[in-house]
Image (spheres, grey):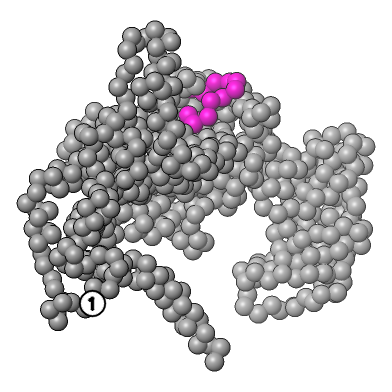
Amino acid sequence: MPARRPIQGRYWVIGLPLAWLIGAFLLPFLIVLRISLAEMGDAGPPLGALVSSAHGMLALTLSNYLFIASDDLYLLTYLSSLKYAAITTLLCLFIGYPFAYCMARARAANRALLLMLVMLPFWTSFLLRIYAWKGILADHGILNDLLLALGSIAQPLQLMHTPLSLLIGMVYAYLPFMILPLYANLVKMDTGLLEAAFDLGATPLQAFWRITVPLSKSGIIAGSMLVFIPALGEYVIPELLGGPQTLMIGRVLWDEFFTNNDWPMASAVTVVALLLILLPMAILNKYRDHRQGGA
Amino acid sequence: MSLQLQPALQPDLHSARQPYLSIRNLVKEFDGVRAVDDVSLAIDQGDIFALLGSSGCGKSTLLRMLAGFEQPSLGQITLAGQDLVDVPPWQRPINMMFQSYALFPHLSAWDNIAFGLRRTAMPKDQVAIRVEQMLALVQLTGYGKRKPHQLSGGQQQRVALARSLAKRPQLLLLDEPLGALDRKLRESTQIELLNILEQVGVTCVMVTHDQDEAISMATRIGVMNQGRILQVGAPRDIYEAPNCRFVADFIGSVNLFPGRIVSAQIDHAVIDAAPCSLFVERCDVGAVGSAVTAALRPEKMVLQSEAPAPSQRAAALEHGHNCAQGVLGAIVYFGDQTRYHVLLDGGVEVKVVRTNAARHDSVRLARGQRVFVWWDGADIMLLAN
């Protein structure tokens, strides 16, 4: 019957993304979770050992998690990852906000061009762009050569493999992810509200803090999430630009998987990292739902 | 017909002193185009002054210059003796009620009203007292905690009004104050708004494209077109004695008859126009032979199926004048009144409006019927070409 069609359509609309999420996110996560609860050697590639077990039952152990909790290295790495991800997010916010603000207030004809310039780096391979920073920041890289030639320094500066080089790379790579949601938010803002604020006696600075910033809160949250979450698990940038001081969980993961070949341990590290990301997000979501529900 | 000017509006009374709000030779150019073209206005304290015009006539630009959002290209604005042109909007003793209200969506009604007060040195307890006063004034006591989206359109309008009045501005600007409300709500809100403005006694400049809104709310109206003020006057003056074709046509509905003066006597003039000759009880219409446009409001014309009896005509002198015959065309029924389109024998089409005073028409007129249209010579408005 034609009248029933829309209802079937609705199942498809909800069902397809749901199937995708189950297949591409939930199932792999459950596999990782299962591996993380196994002894080393019991599980690993290939994944055959996942279900069948030597003792006729599922061998589950929390030993990997206990080890993570007992070993300082993991704790320090998690903390250091959180620190660098947080600093990256803040730097991106402070650089990205004025950037997005100017873009949103630019003449409509220029906005498309500015938007394209923000996205232009994506046309080049991510890896290539990080390598390019190596060329700039190296001991005899472009920046040091330039400063030496100008005579502002006598010795090449140690820029590479420091927290600074790591943060430069991270901020550079993630800035567009902060700018785009902020821009999308700010460009929608009704500038009539600013006029209303001026009219009521607010100076431009007061109007910015009391009207623009609170109204762009959802953009700030979205941008921060888009930067913080991938930055927390970032592997390539710490590997290429970071040094011994800049421990990050992505490198530890890599080592566990491919150097130690300890899949259960690596999986446990992944699950903990995921919880570190999901918990703040869940709290934030609950807070936001509550606000909307109460509103 | 002589005009009944209200005493307060007589020009000789306020030429002696400085007007409260004075706008002199104000010009605003955007890319070489004059949006506001040499506007001068004097507005008295307590006036509710309406700038009336179609969209793009420059009325909003003028209002924005008063608020300080636009800088005039030329000219002066003074309020109570203070020159305003170089004062930024946040330092002007002027507040505005915005067209779409521009309520801050993240703040409650209470905080919206308090926003302006908190920008001043007013102590917190005073702010709270004033906000409660304002909520009471607009009859929204108890609604303070609500966010704008939790309020109806009419309630948002009242919060916006309370917010713009909270700082007790020396001048209140209203941008299409009733524009966002539906028709039914508009009538009640309009009376409420007028009551509040009267209670507060604030001087207002409002901008509207809606002639009904301007006529019913304002004490004085300035009709604008293409950046210029065409006529300033009390609502009745603007409606009954427009000074040009544009104003006559813009305010209400009007029938225009281009004609030529054929005789000018001491107490009357006769004009030869397309539908019939017009007898005007005025002599200051111009020299014999000069071209004029006669304007007649549709509600001041009489439509009937037989020739008007001599007893019906007020002045015997008018016989042979001010009466035309034609064929009834479209009939548009509005409920309270009906508009008849009549194609006169001279080839001119006129609109005649009849109030449906009785439930059942004694004589029903039908399309295609021959009819007579006549009017009183006193109702003819003469406009210079």
- The residue positioned 91% from the left and 47% from the top of the image is B272
- Badge 1 marks a residue whose secondary structure is loop
The answer to whether residue B40 is above or below residue B131 is above
Q: Chain of mark 1?
A: A
Where residue B49 sits: x, y (%)? 52, 38
Above or below for B64 versus A181: above
Q: Residue at x 42, y 58 (%)?
A: B153
Q: Is residue B70 within the magenta segment? A: yes
Q: Is residue B231 above or below residue B55?
A: above
Q: Quadrant of residue B97?
A: top left
Q: Quadrant of residue B122?
A: top left
- For the N terminus of chain A, give its image quadrant: bottom right
Say whether residue B325 is left or right of residue B334: right
- Residue A211 in which image quadrant: top left
Residue occupying image coordinates x 24% and y 56% = A261
What x and y, as percent, mark residue A198?
40, 33
User: Which residue in the protein does label 1 denote?
Assistant: A51
Residue at 87% x, 72% y is B370
